[in-house]
Amino acid sequence: MLTSDMRAVIDVAQLCFAATVTADGKPNVSPKGTIRVWDESRLFFLDIASPGTRANLAHSPWMEINVVDQLSRRGYRFSGPAELHTRESAVYGEGVRRVYGDKPPTSLPSGVVLLSIEHSAPLLSPAYWRGNDETAIRELWRERRATLDEEFEAYLSRVGPVRAP
């Protein structure tokens, strides 16, 4: 089910946005920085600090994940049932190993979320509709990204970096 292009986008992005639904029916979107391919039809990420995602999956185990390569302005959406695996499961141990390798994490994740893909679809920026190809879009956004980084660095030099409370 996962194509080589889907895998390449996931590998380069390593950040996704996971959408779940709260108990009262409200949408909840949360960034996940450990998205990886599990196998041909499943994705996973570590639950490092995701109490909302955990609670939402407990009552409604359906999830959509969007992964987009920022420079190419394209990616994929994946949806299907998701399972939370805790520290006692073999899936948990394997997921942590796949992300951290042989080095133990500084703090153990609470769980591993495994999404079984039932539906996937491409995501494309409207820039593609105007006749631009991926090479042109990547160059445009590489330059734009550099400008944005400079602007944010200047902002941080004025106000200081954010620190966890």
Image (cartoon, rainbow, N blue to C red):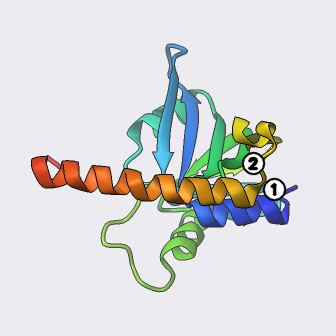
Residue with the mark numbered 1: 41
Instruction: Tell me the residue at 64%/36% (across/down).
Output: 63
Instruction: Tell me the residue at 50%/19% (across/down).
Output: 23
Residue 33 seen in this snapshot: no
| Residue 14 in the image, given as x and y percentages of width and height | 56, 61
Using the image, determine if residue 87 lies above or below residue 47: below
Residue 130 versus residue 30: which sits nearer the camera?
Answer: 130
Quadrant in which the N terminus appears: bottom right
Instruction: Tell me the residue at 25%/56% (across/down).
Output: 153
Q: Residue reaching furthest right?
A: 1
| Residue 112 in the image, given as x and y percentages of width and height | 54, 56
Residue 29 seen in this snapshot: yes
Q: Quadrant of residue 108?
A: bottom left
Residue with the mark numbered 2: 116
Instruction: Tell me the residue at 83%/58% (across/down).
Output: 2
Looking at the image, is mark 2 or mark 1 earlier in the sequence? 1
Dot label at residue 66: none
Q: Quadrant of residue 126?
A: top right
Q: CA distance from mark 2 to mark 1?
A: 6 Å
Numbered disc 2: secondary structure: strand
| Dot 2 amino acid type | Ser
**Is mark 2 in CB contact (under 8 Å) with mark 1?**
yes
Residue 28 versus residue 113: which sits nearer the camera?
Answer: 28
Q: Is residue 6 left or right of residue 94?
A: right
| Residue 88 in the image, given as x and y percentages of width and height | 50, 62
| Residue 104 in the image, given as x and y percentages of width and height | 39, 79
Using the image, determine if residue 76 lies above or below residue 9: above
